[in-house]
Amino acid sequence: MDFQLNDEQQQLRRMVREFAECEIGPRVMEWDKACAVPLETILELGGV
């Protein structure tokens, strides 16, 4: 069985990682303290 990611899966993985690093990482402590993630961010992630 081949468990390697195909090209499409690798691209999605890169896109999600970039989004997380740019949009989530810098704000994660703030959101953790507030116990909330802005709906706008969740919707943006859904667009990835």
Image (cartoon, rainbow, N blue to C red):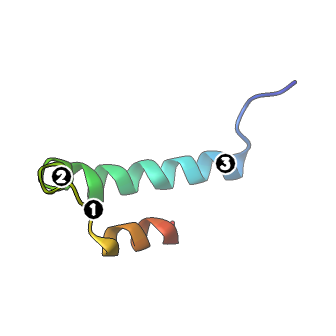
Residue farthest right in this picture: 1
Distance Cα–Cα, label 3 vs label 2: 25 Å
- In terms of image quadrants, where is residue 42? bottom left
Q: Mark 3 — residue?
A: 9
**Amino acid tagged 2:** Pro
Q: Residue 13 at x, y = what percent?
A: 55, 47
Please determine whether, in this image, residue 31 is positioned above or below residue 6.
Answer: below
- 16 to the left or right of 9: left
Q: Residue 3 at x, y = what percent?
A: 76, 28
Q: Observer-nearest residue: 4 or 29?
A: 29
Count of number-bearing discs: 3
Q: Mark 1 — residue?
A: 37
Which mark sits nearer the N-terminus, 2 or 1? Answer: 2
Disc 3 secondary structure class: helix
Disc 2 secondary structure class: helix
Q: Residue 26 at x, y = what percent?
A: 18, 52
**Amino acid tagged 3:** Gln
Picture residue at 33% right of the left edge, 73% below the top: 39
Q: Mark 2 — residue?
A: 26
Mark 2 residue crowding within 10 angstroms, few (<14) / some (14–19) / many (20+): few
Q: Which mark is residue 47?
A: none
- 1 to the left or right of 34: right
Closer to us: mark 2 or mark 1? Answer: 1
Mark 1 residue crowding within 10 angstroms, few (<14) / some (14–19) / many (20+): some
Which image quarter is the N terminus in? Answer: top right
Distance Cα–Cα, label 2 vs label 1: 13 Å
Q: Observer-nearest residue: 9 or 42?
A: 42
Mark 3 residue crowding within 10 angstroms, few (<14) / some (14–19) / many (20+): few
Please determine whether, in this image, residue 39 is positioned above or below residue 36.
Answer: below
Marks 1 and 3 close (CB-CB < 8 Å)? no
- 5 to the left or right of 35: right
